[in-house]
Amino acid sequence: MAFDRRTFLAASIAACAGPPALAQASFNFGAAAAYSADRRGVSLLVMQGGRVVFEDYPNGGGGDRGWELASGTKSFTGVMAAAAVQDRLLDWDEFAADTLGEWRGDERRAITIRHLLSLASGIEGGPIARPPSYGDAIAQHAVAAPGARFAYGPTPFQIFGEIMRRKTNGDPLDYLHRRVLDPLGIAPTHWRRGSDGMPHLPSGAGLTARDWARFGCFVLRDGEGRVDAHALAQCFVGSRANPGYGLSWWLLREGSCRRGGAPAGLALTRRWPRAWAASSWPRAQAISGSIWRRAWTSSLRGRRRAFFKRCANAGATGMAGPTPNSCGPCSRAE
């Protein structure tokens, strides 16, 4: 189901692991849920130690109801690419022209997979929320040298989609399902496709809150052995063109978030659904700064701070924060 940022104010807390600074923290999830519901939120989910410990679905929400992730969809692309690296379908630093033969005779022959997914290929990003068809995407020419500048937008992701289509001789989404989503039990409620019938990779996926948190937990745990940890780690290395962006993931860097009244080590994040990741580990910072980042407008900053204060405020319904190395297998509490 589609939503706009005014009506879909969902909330999720992904606390798969936490630093010592949070061990004594207490979170009043009931107050946070009431705050979210009062502001038209539809989903609040808390995951602690890999286990869902609190969830609330007011205002027409539901545990089985999916919501469109918008640009959060981009996060799947880097993970798909990491799986393809493990499967030796591609290499991060291979030339895209090795697969896209039509690029071999012009300036695009120097563009690598890493350039594409770090959005530093030199090809313009294109209009936000308007992904071109795969064919139209690969027809675009570079306007800058590879690695020279960062350009955010849907076009590079659609180009990568065409590369995966040719490498797998099939639908890129089929590969993502087979390698990542199906083994994790993640079932998108929908996924938008273009006029060419191919899936939109920069946007358009719909997930339930539980499945969205499950995916975050999977990445937080270095791919859980299903995707090579070294290949996955490349998603969280910034480029010279933009140190704050990895391979399809925004990165949370030191000083990029205001602590405000938050406990030390708690990363305040920006993304639909609004989320707080209780960890100071680099990968958890990437999760909090990437899975959830980017959609919050300045008008919502005050609400975000207020929501966090409700959540972090100790109370009768509070729950102790996660302890170090408490991360067990992701599970769904019944």
Image (spheres, helix red, strand yellow):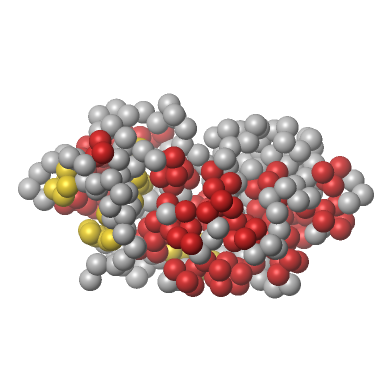
Q: Residue furthest left?
A: 316
Q: On the rendered structure, is 75 left or right of 108?
A: left
> What residue sits 27% from the left and 61% below the top?
52
> What residue sits 70% from the left and 73% below the top?
170
Q: Residue furthest right?
A: 105
- Residue 162 appears at what percent x and percent y? 73, 61
Q: On the rendered structure, is 89 left or right of 25?
A: right
Rendering quarter of residue 307 = top left
Rendering quarter of residue 98 = bottom right
- Residue 60 appears at what percent x and percent y? 29, 64
Is residue 169 placed above or below 309 in the rendered structure? below
| 212 or 216, nearer to the observer | 216
Is residue 228 placed above or below 112 in the rendered structure? below
Res 10 visible = yes
| 49 or 30, nearer to the observer | 49
Rendering quarter of residue 213 = bottom left
Quadrant containing the N terminus in the rendered view = bottom left
Q: On the rendered structure, is 211 left or right of 110?
A: left
| 16 or 173, nearer to the observer | 16
> What residue sits 58% from the left and 37% below the top?
238
Res 1 visible = no
- Residue 274 appears at what percent x and percent y? 36, 47
Quadrant containing the C terminus in the rendered view = bottom left
> What residue sits 84% from the left and 47% below the top?
109
For the image, the number of numbered tags is 0
- Residue 28 appears at what percent x and percent y? 16, 46
